[in-house]
Image (cartoon, coloured by chain):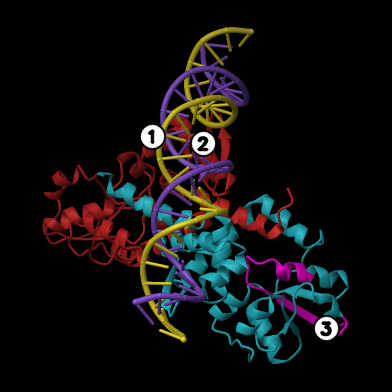
Chain colours: A red, B cyan, C purple, D yellow
DNA sequence: AGATCATTCAAGTGATATCTTGAATAATAG
DNA sequence: CTATTATTCAAGATATCACTTGAATGATCT
C-alpha cells in the first residue's frame, strides 16, 4: 500500500513492457496492425483458443496498447495509436541489430543466401508511378481483400509456384506482407531468387505503408 | 525443437520486452543511463542485493540492452546504444499518455497542483547562454560530480530547504535529475513552487541532455 | 603460490504467468 | 421471453520468474 511513487511509476512502465513480453501477444498486435479485428478473427489468425486470446487482449488493453469498442454482439479491438506500432518496431530493431540469434533465424529464412537490401517505401511508390515493377502481396487472400497496395498481385507462398510462369523472367519484383514481424515476404523473396528472379523485399509491410499516408485499395467483395 | 521460424522470431522480440518488464531492471537501466557503472555501484544505487543485481544485469545483457567489459577486477556495464534509451522513453510515453494510473501518480508528486510544462533542452541552453536562469541538479552528490550541466547547482531534496534562502525570490529555476524515469525533479519543482518560487522541470534529464550532444562538466575530485 | 576482492553460479522458495476447461455475461434474433 | 452468438470470467495445472543464500570462479596483489 505504501510503496514509493517512484516504484509505482516503474511498475506501470514495466506493465507496458510485460504486455509485449509474450510471443502470443506480439502475434496479436501484428494482426491488429493490419486493421481492427473482432476477437474471433484474431483467435483464428493467431491460432490461439478463443478464451486464451480474449485474456491476452485484455492484458494488452490494461497496458493501453490496444483499445476496444462494442459493435453489436462483437467486440472490436484495435491498436490505441501509432505509438504502439512504434514500440513494436523499436523492439524489433533492437533485437535484429544486437541479437545474434535473430540474425541466424533471418538467414535461415533466406535459405542461407545473403538477402538483398529491402526497397524503401518511397522508392516503391516512385517505381509504381512509372510502372517499372511488379508488386507481390504475400498475405492470405482475406487480408489482401481488406486492403493492399494498388496494383499488387496476391499470392500465398503455396501459390507462388504457379505464379512463377506468369512473371516475366527479367521483371523486378517487390514482395511485402504484414510488416516487419511477418516472415512471408522473406520466404517469398528467397523462393523467387532461388528461381533466378530479381526479387526484393519491401521495407515494412502494409501497416507501415498505410502509416506513411500512402494509398491502399480494398478488393470489391 | 522444430518450432517455426516465425515463432522463433517472436520469441526473440519478446525476450527484449521481457527484459524491460521488471521494475528492478528499469531502475538499473536508469542508473546506466547516467553513465557506465560497476556491478556494486548499481546494486547500491538501486537497493538490490549484489547477486540479484548481477542476475538482472545478465538478463539485460541477454536481451542486448546492455553490454559489459572487464576492467581489472570489476565488470563495467553500460547501455548498448541510444536505442536502449529510446525504447525506455517510448515505454514511458505510452504509459504516460494512456495509463490513468500514471497520471495519478505524477499528480501526487506535484502535491495535487497542476505542474507547469517542462522547459525544453534547447530553451534551457539558450537561457543558460544569457545567464537568465538558475539550474538545479537534484541528484546525489556523486552523480553530480560525475557530470552535470555546466553552471548547475547541486542539491538533494533534503538539502533544498537550506538552499531556498540563497535563491533570489524572483529567479527562474529549472530543475533536472536522472531523466524521465526519475521523480526528484518533479518533487523539487513541487517543493519550490509551494514556496512561491518560479520553478520548472527540464524536459528529460542528464542522459537526454548528453544525448543531444550538449556539454557537461565533471566536478574536480 | 596463496590471499583478497568483485562478480557470477547454483539451488531452493514463494509468487506470477500461460494455457486449458467449463461456466457466466451481454447483446441480438425469433 | 427464450434461444443464440460473441465474449469474458473463474478455477486449476504447469512452467517460469524474482529473490535469497551460500559456494565457485576470475583477476589482481603480496
Disc 2, SS: helix
Horizontal placement of A24 versus A118: left or right? right
Marks 2 & 1 on one chain: yes
Considering only vertical position in the picture, is D18 above or below C27? Answer: below
Image coordinates of residue C14 in percent, x first then y, are 58, 41
Give the residue at mark 2. Answer: A55
Disc 3, SS: loop
Q: Residue at x 48, y 73 (%)?
A: B78
Horizontal placement of D20 versus A105: left or right? right
Q: Nearer the viewer, residue B186 or A83?
A: B186
Q: Nearer the viewer, residue B24 or B80?
A: B24
Tell me which corner region of the image, top left, top right, bottom left or bottom right, holds residue B184: bottom right
Q: Is residue B91 visible?
A: no
Image coordinates of residue A148 in percent, x first then y, are 35, 49
Q: Nearer the viewer, residue B155 or A28?
A: B155
Are dots 3 and 2 in contact, CB under 8 Å?
no
Q: Quadrant of the C terminus of chain B?
A: bottom right
Question: Separation of disc 2 and disc 1 at Cα?
Answer: 15 Å
Tell me which corner region of the image, top left, top right, bottom left or bottom right, holds residue A195: bottom left
> Which-is-in-front pick, marks 2 and 1?
2
Horizontal placement of A59 versus A161: left or right? right
- The subunit letter for the residue under badge 1 reads A
Range of magenta residues: B165-189
Image coordinates of residue C19 in percent, x first then y, are 42, 34
Tell me which corner region of the image, top left, top right, bottom left or bottom right, holds residue A95: bottom left
> Which-is-in-front pick, marks 1 and 3?
3
Question: Separation of disc 3 and disc 2 at Cα?
Answer: 53 Å
Which numbered circle lies on residue B171?
A: 3
Which numbered circle lies on residue A44?
A: 1
- The subunit letter for the residue under badge 2 reads A
Amino acid at each position: 500500500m505504501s510503496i514509493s511513487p517512484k516504484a509505482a511509476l516503474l511498475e506501470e512502465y514495466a506493465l507496458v513492457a510485460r504486455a509485449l513480453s509474450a510471443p502470443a501477444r506480439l502475434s496479436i498486435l501484428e494482426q491488429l496492425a493490419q486493421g481492427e479485428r473482432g476477437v474471433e478473427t484474431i483467435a483464428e489468425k493467431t491460432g490461439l483458443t478463443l478464451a486464451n486470446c480474449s485474456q491476452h487482449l485484455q492484458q494488452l488493453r490494461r497496458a493501453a496498447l490496444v483499445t476496444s469498442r462494442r459493435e453489436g454482439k462483437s467486440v472490436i479491438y484495435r491498436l490505441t495509436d501509432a505509438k504502439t506500432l512504434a514500440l513494436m518496431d523499436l523492439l524489433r530493431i533492437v533485437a535484429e541489430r544486437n541479437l545474434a540469434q535473430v540474425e541466424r533465424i533471418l538467414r535461415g529464412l533466406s535459405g542461407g543466401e545473403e538477402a538483398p537490401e529491402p526497397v524503401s517505401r518511397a522508392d516503391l511508390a516512385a517505381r509504381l508511378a512509372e510502372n517499372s515493377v511488379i508488386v507481390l502481396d504475400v498475405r492470405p487472400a482475406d487480408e489482401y481483400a481488406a486492403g493492399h497496395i494498388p496494383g499488387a498481385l496476391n499470392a500465398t507462398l503455396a501459390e507462388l509456384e504457379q505464379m512463377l510462369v506468369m512473371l516475366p523472367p527479367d521483371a523486378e519484383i517487390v514482395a511485402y506482407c504484414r510488416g516487419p514481424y511477418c516472415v512471408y515476404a522473406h520466404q517469398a523473396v528467397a523462393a523467387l531468387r532461388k528461381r533466378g528472379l530479381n526479387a526484393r523485399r519491401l521495407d515494412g509491410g502494409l501497416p507501415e505503408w498505410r502509416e506513411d499516408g500512402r494509398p491502399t485499395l480494398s478488393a470489391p467483395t
